[in-house]
Image: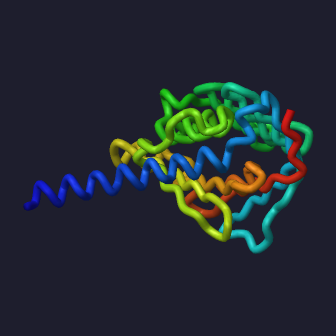
Amino acid sequence: MKRMLLILTLLCQLTIGVAQQADFQKAVARFKNAANVTAAVTKTTHKQAVAKDVTSKGTLTMKRPATVSIVIDGGKDQLLMEGSNFTMVVKGKKHTTSSQQNVQFTSFQTVFESILSGGQKDISKLSDLTVNKQGGNLVLTITPKADNKKAARRMLFSSFVLTIDPKTSELKSLRMNERAGYTEYTFSGYQFK
């Protein structure tokens, strides 16, 4: 009996994963035929110890197969994903890593590669990803898991939350949660080419 319940539970989880993958593919279908996508960006930085949020403007550029670039304030702040390589520039100071060295970016890379492919890359088996529908949007939450306590303490981000409008295939926001606040990028004015 326990074995049968376990099998049914696994089948339900697989079905949920398949349904979520199908919802995701529909939500990002417009990317399938676009080699280059651009949008305007508003960056909001929230720190718990600071009363007022800081906002700034920039641009988002996404190119197939695996390039995502967010440039703020003329390049003073940047996020760049080129395949498995990640570059972050904060107030002119450059930090680099890769999804092979830093596990917190592994699923992040897979999700963005899947978005750029129009959902052709399967995300249903990512163990640190949840997909939910909220207010007509599709919300993807990546909660990276560390192998040990030391690795967990070194993780810069506790989670990444992506909100996608399934009607327009537009990524509405990317929120990167930290221990003492978050950075959120909201996107508008999309151009699919």
Position of 4 compared to 177: left or right?
left
Which residue is pictured at 55% across the width and 33% down the height?
Answer: 121
Residue 30 placement: quadrant: top right
User: Can see residue 95?
Assistant: no
Judging from the image, the colouring scheme is rainbow
Query: What is the tally of numbered marks visible in this picture?
Result: 0
Is residue 129 depicted above or below 53 in this figure?
above
Which residue is pictured at 86% across the width and 37% down the height?
Answer: 75
Depth check: give the residue in front, 153 or 121: 121
Q: Could you tell me which quadrant the N terminus lies in?
A: bottom left
Which residue is pictured at 10% across the width and 60% down the height?
Answer: 2
Position of 37 compared to 150: left or right?
right
- Spot occupied by residue 162 in the image (x, y as percentages of width and height): 64, 53
Which residue is pictured at 73% across the width and 34% down the height?
Answer: 68
Position of 30 compared to 114: left or right?
right
Q: Could you tell me which quadrant the C terminus lies in?
A: top right
- Spot occupied by residue 67 in the image (x, y as percentages of width and height): 71, 29
User: Can see residue 16?
Assistant: yes
- Spot occupied by residue 82 in the image (x, y as percentages of width and height): 67, 26
Residue 29 placement: quadrant: top right
Is residue 161 depicted above or below 112 in this figure?
below
- Spot occupied by residue 31 in the image (x, y as percentages of width and height): 73, 37
Which residue sits furthest bottom?
51
Is residue 69 depicted above or below 53 in this figure?
above
